[in-house]
Image (spheres, rainbow, N blue to C red):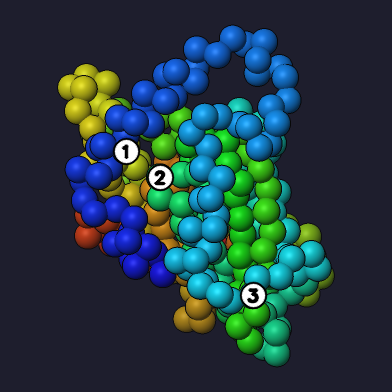
Amino acid sequence: MLSGWRQALITGEAAFKAAAVVLLTAFMAFSTVPSSAWAEETRRDDVSPGFNHDAWNDIRGMLYEDQVIKDGKGVISLTAPYRAEDAAIVPITIAAAKPQTKGEFIESITLVIDQNPSPVAAVFHLTPDSGLATIDTRIRINAFTDIRAIAKMNDGRLFMATEFIKAAGGCSTPGLSEMDEAIARAGKMKMKFLASDMEGAGGQAQLLIRHPNFSGLQMDQISGDFIPAHYVDSIEVTRGGAKILGVEGDISLSEDPSIRFYFGDDTSGDISAVVTDTHGKTFSKSWPVSKLAKN
């Protein structure tokens, strides 16, 4: 899904740089707004002069054409801060209402950020072995925007949850680390075991990936040049050989991606993660599930 979206939306590095100039200029102008204005609740239909009210209609048409998308209540929900503290690292939770079963399960979740330069932030692929289709991650927000989680069921039905976030400049914000340092540590991974909080969902874990996830819209503070896009574009997690989670990533996932997920009831074998990035690098690591369960 994401490869087709990229081809339709972005034609090359020149397009990234042109978009970055516009976005940086807009953000600089936006940052001059008096602090008192931030204290006022901006009307949702008048968030900024550049707000694209037709964004979702265009995105929906490209992704789903005329398919019916129902309200996500009772199937999927989305939690996000109304006003983000840091637009480059915005925590969100996509929560499934009930555990995965072989008869009925969420097959994929598409995360859309309407006003971002590349709106499809990620597609999460899940299976009955996932336990629960609940995902926590961190994203970049470039302007006041709706974010959406669209769940596709195994029978093809679509359900959507939506939240609104006030944040700006996250796609062009420089990384926290020096560029050479960030590239050198790329691909290092950790897996943390977390207590499960839903009966029947199985174990829960958090995958932490060291990677700069350069968006292509960030500027090198020393040279003044744009840093070429370089980000994690795929993640696959298996448990004992069974696929638990697949992720198609894009520039809207934050630096050092973090994905919290469920991995079902089975505690035998290993949990393995294979990660690739847009520079053709592949990183992999495994952790014994039984060892994780004791942490």
Mark 3 burial class by Cα count in 10 Å: few <14, some 14-19, many 20+:
few
| Residue 17: image location, x then y, percent | 25, 37
Task: Please tell me the numbered disc located at residue 19.
Answer: 1
| Residue 76: image location, x then y, percent | 72, 64
Identify the residue at horizontal 67%, vertical 64% (top origin): 160
The residue type indicated by label 1 comes to Ala
Mark 1 burial class by Cα count in 10 Å: few <14, some 14-19, many 20+:
some
Q: Quadrant of the N terminus?
A: bottom left
Res 225 → quadrant = top left
Q: Quadrant of the C terminus?
A: bottom right
Marks 1 and 3, the one that precedes in the sequence: 1
Task: Please tell me the numbered disc located at residue 117.
Answer: 2
Task: Please tell me the numbered disc located at residue 68.
Answer: 3
Res 62 → quadrant = bottom left
Label 2 with label 1: CB-CB less than 8 Å: yes
Label 1 with label 3: CB-CB less than 8 Å: no
| Residue 74: image location, x then y, percent | 81, 68
The residue type indicated by label 3 comes to Val
